[in-house]
Amino acid sequence: MSKEKKTAMCLSQRALAMQASPIRRLVPLADAARQRGTHIYHLNIGQPDIATPRDIMDAIRNFGEEVLAYGPSQGLPALRQEIKKYLERQDIMVSADDVLVTTAGSEAIIFAMMAIGDPGDEILVPEPFYTNYNGFATMAGMKIVPVPTDVEEGFALPSKAEFVKRITDRTKAIMYCSPNNPTGALFSRKDLEMLAGLAQEKNLWLLADEVYREFTYDGGYHTSVLHIPGVEDRAIMMDSISKRFSACGARVGCVVCRNTEIMQTMLKFGQARLCPPTIEQVGAIAGYQNIDKYLKKMITEYQRRRDVVCEELAKIPGAIFKKPAGAFYIMPHLPIDDSDKFAQWMLTDFSHEGATTMVAPGDGFYATPGQGKQEVRLAYVLNEGDLRKALKVLAKGIEAYNRRK
Amino acid sequence: MSKEKKTAMCLSQRALAMQASPIRRLVPLADAARQRGTHIYHLNIGQPDIATPRDIMDAIRNFGEEVLAYGPSQGLPALRQEIKKYLERQDIMVSADDVLVTTAGSEAIIFAMMAIGDPGDEILVPEPFYTNYNGFATMAGMKIVPVPTDVEEGFALPSKAEFVKRITDRTKAIMYCSPNNPTGALFSRKDLEMLAGLAQEKNLWLLADEVYREFTYDGGYHTSVLHIPGVEDRAIMMDSISKRFSACGARVGCVVCRNTEIMQTMLKFGQARLCPPTIEQVGAIAGYQNIDKYLKKMITEYQRRRDVVCEELAKIPGAIFKKPAGAFYIMPHLPIDDSDKFAQWMLTDFSHEGATTMVAPGDGFYATPGQGKQEVRLAYVLNEGDLRKALKVLAKGIEAYNRRK
């Protein structure tokens, strides 16, 4: 058989380049621990324990159509209208035509990336960043160029110079997430104005992942990319109901942009996949209509949890972190040699009073090799009591890990 | 501003290459016709009018979890198990691990394409083909290479030689759909054995879109790519519940393959997008558990509709078609100069007794320029009475269209 024949049926380079999920690859180890009878505190994944609002569940249960039919590729008109109104209440003025409903935030990111870049093109992203940006970029054949931030500075946005020196003739966009997954950092209006100015100066797209928009603490205000004047044509906001409504399984998100040309383009991707899930959009409509009923309570709850995590982390000798201002993550530097090994060891070799704690190793959130080895991401998605126990178990784990031979 | 700056913020080549949906672009014209009070018989889109099975809707309404949480990236284990059992009943032996649940058939196709090919790689597809293959290939940077079929031969599978002469060193796969959208052709076991032999000989992947698997008439048997021995490592089957359960809005599909390496690869794409919609998977489980209750009745109904369409088409002078053996589409050659113009004209300029008929222009299903101009795709997704009226209106429309100056 000739060489060319041999290469025809193989995996694509793109497939080989796909990173296996650094969080999900610990799952078999967790399963084994559970089978041994160990209780696992899950701080490893952003799956809130908070109940999905009743209004959403009721709307889903009351879905009355006889045929579960295709919806419009743009999303249900009523949902696009509710999203427009929801944004209006945050002083973001857009029309329903500026809203394209997507199958969760994941698809919003994929559509945005594919609309602005071709294989080989680059996107600047403050690092550490949400792991799956890598996966989406790989699917699109594009490259994430990391711009480092530092735990000692609370993962504050890098300076303009740090972005500028990484811009090449393949750079198409700056992308960021605020409030940030995985760090909890909240970028200020001034930060965003710097990014917006840079995007204008270098003629780049500006992509904002605002999935955690409401998750700000101590009265902190979230500035949207859509609040910044001068970048109306280049600002693309990516969103999801997953966290806001504790509805991760719904797979309803959206992309919002005032540039009609790029919206038309993303709609073509949307038409190819026909439509987002219908019933869960009906649920989302009810969520947006009733958002004021529970959002404040939920944020108060998360702020308390953040305080608990920080209190407990402060007791761990050698832990370095700043109190995060948003999202529901914190990414402390811990006195460990290798967070990947540590996360595995916690599942395979450790328990304290019958329990262990599962964390997300820091290196999975970095594109720069060697970075994040002493960091872990903790998602504070457990109730206060469990969270306190989980952190105590983590502290005991660190001690034992460092005592082991 | 320098030239290089000007090019940074622009649409991607991929975005520019995306075809606007040839069916959906007629929608504004249909809206306007409706506003004028014209009734529209929709034969243009594969949205069945048949009620989604009660079991599915009940399962959705009875969803009892408090938190609408992320599911596994592979899909719910219970659903994968039901799909395995469903395939077993059709003599397709796979394990639940060979099943990856996707966000509808669309995602199944995207994952399969991205796993097997890189930008510039080619996939051979019998033409005409499902329009959105083009869109998915464009998103993946890949190229669909059409292999022509002919209305006069009922769009039968092309000969081996026709495939062979289009194979280049960039060819990665042969992809086909049977029962076929848009033609209704059903490929025989012998056809598939030819394709399988060719795939082995040339070391290509073999991708089968089997979304219409049950939609076969006159006792015709659907052979799955997974039935064919010798291609276990290279056969990838893509599926969806959309048509089978008249649940197009559910967005639940799957990809089935016995090659664990490619399954692991596709799972990495799946992990990046986290999971398919949870509640609608719960609905799908109930659908598969109760499929025997209504499938036979549904197929009998579609067979009757097909007969009605063929009866009425036979009365149109100059119409050329063969009675299709599967799916719920037919793609007749009609005595018109340009199916795109004709489809528009039917919406903008024609009505008969207050009604018109909306069809999908044939050229949208061809990659070869100039092809399909005298063909339209009709989806027989209306009840018998309406279908007969829709075809009579179509016949009157063709007469009037050809009489116009």
Image (tube, coloured by chain):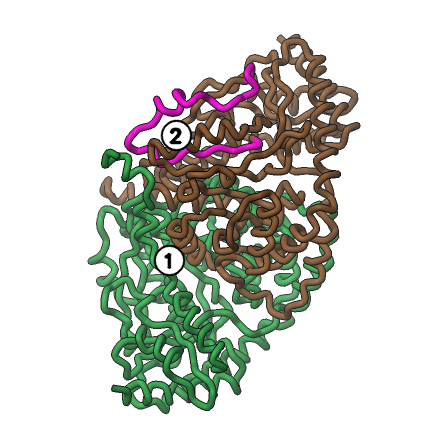
Chain colours: A green, B brown
Mark 2 surroundings within 10 Å by alpha-carbon count, few (fewer than 14), some (14 through 19), many (20 or more)? some
Q: Amino acid at mark 2?
A: Leu
Q: Number of numbered discs present?
A: 2
For numbered disc 2, what is the local secondary structure? Answer: helix
Q: Amino acid at mark 1?
A: Tyr
Q: Quadrant of the C terminus of chain B?
A: top right
Q: Is residue A400 above or below residue A181?
A: below
Q: Is residue A249 magenta?
A: no
Residue at the image point whose x is 59% and y is 38% from the top: B213
Relative to residue A14, is residue B81 drawn left or right?
A: right
Q: Which residue is mark 1?
A: A133
Mark 1 surroundings within 10 Å by alpha-carbon count, few (fewer than 14), some (14 through 19), many (20 or more)? many
Q: Nearer the viewer, residue A50 or B88?
A: B88
Q: Quadrant of the N terminus of chain B?
A: top left
Q: Nearer the viewer, mark 2 or mark 1?
A: 2
Q: Which mark is residue B198?
A: 2
Callout 2: chain = B
Q: Nearer the viewer, residue B136 or B202?
A: B202
Q: Position of residue A364 (x, y in %)?
A: 33, 66
Q: Is residue B176 magenta?
A: yes
Q: Is residue A216 above or below residue A73?
A: below
Q: Nearer the viewer, residue A16 or B398?
A: A16
Relative to residue A228, is residue A8 drawn left or right?
A: left
For numbered disc 1, what is the local secondary structure? Answer: helix
Q: Position of residue B148 (x, y in %)?
A: 46, 21
The magenta segment is B151-179
**Based on the displayed image, in which of its 4 quarters is residue A12 positioned?**
top left
